[in-house]
Amino acid sequence: MPGKKIIWRIVFLLLTGLLIFLARYIYLAAPVISAYGAKTACSAVYLQHRQIQTVIEEELSDFPFSVATYTLNEHDASVTGSVLGFAKRKAIYREGLGATLVNDSSETQIRAQQFRLPAKPVKYTDSIPWPNGDLLPDTLPGNIDSIALHSILQRALNEGGMAKSQHTTALAVVYDGQLIAEKYAAGYNKHTLMPGWSVAKSITGALTGILVKEGKLNVNAPAPVAEWKGTSRESITIKQLLQQTSGLDYEENYRKAGSATSMLFKKGNAAAYAAQLPLKYAPGSVFNYSSGNSNIISRIIRQATGEKNYHAFPYETLFYKTGMYSMVLEPDASGTYVGSSFCYATARDYARFGLLYYNNGIWDNERILPEDWVKATVQPPAANTLQHYGYQFWLNGFNKNDPLQRWYADVPADMYFADGFGGQDIYIIPSKQLIVVRLGLHVTDENRLLREIISTIQ
């Protein structure tokens, strides 16, 4: 009958359309799934010293990463991911550099790269007082309710049990420069390196500041990007890159194939990918959070320091001067640090980074950052109508007189923070003399956590 034929044709067309959609999704998404999982597992195995099966169960068991297979090869220190045997992507580990995805260049070419990395200072940090070392005092400030504080941290650590949406791996609290509390989930401790994800952006911001102090960069000058010469993008300044107002046509969306997933997981040169993007808005006119901007800055840092000094530069001028001996920045296949996303450190070292900003860029009476750098960092651009972003740091919101219009309603307006995917955060609250580091697999109610920590200070 004609009616049934029409129905079957509609069903056939719908099924065909669905199959085409699924095929396109798999074609675009499978390489990203494989690459993300391979990179995550490789870093976890070789930087965190975890078993790959544990990583798969805790970080890669949710869809879509659960459809992939991840294989560890201990002979060449690598992890390969694939989806149903296709879209194979490999991440390789190199000592001092962490994990790098093999993209655009061959594995042989990447392994042949030469890097000058400084040796870690030989110091017995357990006998050196915090913050330069790990020796903590026997007593806490008298105005701290330590019993309540430890109870709050333990509750945050246990919240949701093993439910990943609530899973916290590390917490550290610094008050008036002193580390007053820290707690870790089972399998983690004060020596465990943790992924910071976009905390790397804040580190990139600090490295930019150091070069400004050295007179090698000027934030108000046009960014030195070769691809932009003679184009409408050549007026983009370093400041606009820092403040995420470059105007580049980039979408920070990891739920679909696009700018973010292509740059981080399909390309061997993240900065080059971001630099070739066209303008969507006039530079300085619109706030658009973009890992692409951060990676362009990372390449600018490489150019400003020179090939001979670049890879040692973060360690010699920032990390080792502030006792952050665990910090690892991971490069892409081009050798440029992925300044938007790939960093690892202990919770204590993330706390030290926060303390550097809390102390206005000074460490042990040495000025690491320019005198006005922290002040500039917490000033949002006019284009950012929510007033919640500065120099690669998030701010607490635009209406400082109305808590309901702040990012964290129960936290002082002067709070600013480095924030990474999954709730990797370094909160700096000058008015409360606090720095709080929270690291985990997924986000939790951090407004509540910060409110409760603040309440323990009398």
Image: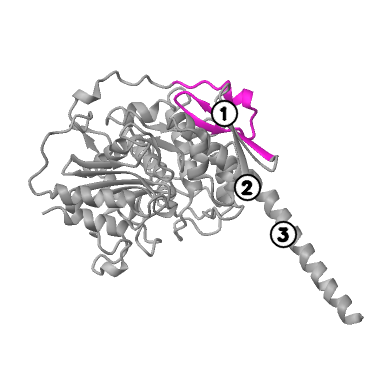
Is residue 136 a member of the stretch shown in magenta? no
Q: Which residue is mark 2?
A: 67
- Cα–Cα span, label 2 and label 3: 17 Å
Q: Nearer the viewer, residue 272 or 27?
A: 27
Local SS, label 3: helix
Residue 426 at what x, y percent from top left? 31, 46
Is residue 99 a member of the stretch shown in magenta? yes
Q: Which residue is mark 3?
A: 21
- Whether 127 is drawn above or below 221: the answer is above
- Counting residues from the N terminus, which is met first, the one under dot 2 or under dot 3? 3
Residue in view at x 27 percent, y 37 percent = 352
Can you tell which quarter of the image residue 349 is in?
A: top left
Instruction: Identify the magenta region.
Output: 87-116
Local SS, label 2: helix
Q: Which residue is mark 1?
A: 78
Give the farthest residue toward the front: 161
- Cα–Cα span, label 2 and label 1: 20 Å
Comparing labels 2 and 1, the label whose residue is closer to the camera = 2
User: For the residue marked with disc 3, what is the amino acid?
Assistant: Phe
- Counting residues from the N terminus, which is met first, the one under dot 1 or under dot 3? 3
- Whether 240 is drawn above or below 342: the answer is below
Residue 272 visible in the snapshot: no
User: For the residue marked with disc 1, what is the amino acid?
Assistant: Ser
Q: Nearer the viewer, residue 293 or 222?
A: 293
Comparing labels 2 and 3, the label whose residue is closer to the camera = 2
